[in-house]
Amino acid sequence: MTRRVLAVVAAVLAAATGALVPAHQAAAAGTLLSQGRPATASSVEHAGLPASAAVDGNPDTRWSSQFSDPQWIQVDLGGTAAIDQVVLNWETAYATGYRVEVSADGSAWTTIYSTTTGRGGVETLTVTGTGRYVRVYGTTRATGWGYSLWEFQVFGTGPGGTDPFWGDTSTIPPAQNVLMVKILNRTNGRFPDSQVYWSYNGQVHSIAEQPYFDMPVNTAGRMYFHLGSPDSPYFDFIEFTVGPSVFNGNTTRVDAIGLKLAMRLHAHDGYDVSVGEDQATFAEDRAVTFQRFIDEVPPPFRVLAQTPYRIIAPGSHPDFRPGGVNANYFTSYANSVGVTATTAEVFGCAGSLAGNPDMCAALNRHVATLPRAQWSDPNQYYRAAPANYYAKFWHDRAINRLAYGFPYDDVANQSSFISHSNPQYLLVAVGW
Ligand SMILES: [Ca+2]
């Protein structure tokens, strides 16, 4: 059973009932507002470590202050914004005590987050605030050095009406077929539009040649994306089934991830839903994402990062297949709930699990020994081993935490599947 088959089944059901669409929020997680904006700081350690290096999107450059308390760094968003998340990527010289503040004018500040127990590393702060300026105000240093940030990212909504990630949608031409697809280069400058390729049904174009595709009716279609050249090993794809007046599709990580992808479906009735990797993940360099995967997953899963091209699903790796060093990873856990299956069959929802989507999903999410009522509660997922930590990683980095991490990840509406009638356009963001 492949995801592609499942997509068709799901699509047919959705088209027939109109009721399978997850009821998640239409609003995407906040947009990255701070990257490339003007930044200033109370001091710099030296001219090679300026404030601007904390908002340049490059994980290898940083701001560092002089070695005293207090110190601050601020970014000007260019207009009033509603701020919902701040991500601080600290160098070794981090703050144990600091505040995050917002301001309308750069002089009167309101605290939206404060701590005396900062732990350094990457801190992702969920906040609520409104302002044009956002400041990190350090009060206590963790080391004898100053305060130093590789990246300081502010997420939210605004200023202005156009979401900079998805761009201006007012100029998208109307479709003659079912819907207009627009492909967006979101590689953070790593590839020019002339080297971001899309292909569908024998057509191959760069974004520079043709950013639009007028999508006709099709069954179980795929659109591929390649970076650098039309047959580059840096590639990925989306899957879809398009009816005369309906789009059904998903980003899939069932086999592997080759490129960061997100898509946003807009329909004539105002439906507007985004799925795929979140904007913080798009903003992050590829090498950082690969390293984060290696750092976060348990040791048996680290081999899945096939740097620099792909991170593959565990069921595809020889370690987890019969005869492999981790061939028994899932076996006893599956046996404990009466399932006889190899580890690769659990990851791939194959063998006896092909006909048992709920159980396959429960095993991958490590909820199979919980009462059935908890199988649909995402708060219970991936809390203990054995579990599909590959899938967990992509859920953690997905818009609304929805991802296709294994073939039956659509159980309990956890997948990145979107479907709606009378579609108008589909934006597809291709990242690095
Ligand atoms: Ca930087």
Image (cartoon, rainbow, N blue to C red):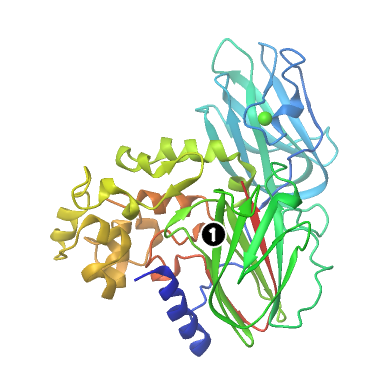
Query: Is residue 385 in view?
Result: no
Screen quadrant of the N terminus: bottom left
Please give the count of numbered marks on the rendered protein: 1
Which of these two is toward me, 43 or 9? Answer: 9
Q: Could you say where residue 332 lies in the image, as x and y percent from the top left?
A: 15, 54
User: On the picture, is 324 further left or further right than 404?
Assistant: left
Rendered position, 72 above or below 405: above
Residue 63 appears in which quarter of the rendering? top right
Query: Is residue 413 in view?
Result: yes
The residue pinned by badge 1 equals 400
Q: Could you say where residue 412 lies in the image, as x and y percent from the top left?
A: 40, 70
Q: Could you say where residue 256 lies in the image, as x and y percent from the top left?
A: 45, 54
Queried on whether the Cβ of the residue with tag 1 lies below 8 angstroms from ligand 1, the answer reads no
**Residue name at image x 64 percent, y 43 percent:** 283
**Residue name at image x 18 percent, y 59 percent:** 334
Rendered position, 93 above or below 329: above
Instruction: Rate crowding at label 1 as few (under 14), some (14 to 19) or many (20 or more) other CA atoms within 10 Å.
Output: many
Task: Give the SS element for disc 1.
Answer: helix
User: On the picture, is 253 further left or further right than 238?
Assistant: left
Tell me the kind of residue under disc 1: Asn
Residue 399 appears in which quarter of the rendering? bottom right
Rendered position, 215 above or below 303: below
Which of these two is toward me, 387 or 343? Answer: 343
User: On the picture, is 26 further left or further right than 416?
Assistant: right
Give the quarter the ligand 1 occupies. top right
Q: Could you say where residue 205 lies in the image, as x and y percent from the top left?
A: 71, 61
User: On the picture, is 359 further left or further right than 168?
Assistant: left
**Residue name at image x 72 percent, y 24 percent:** 72
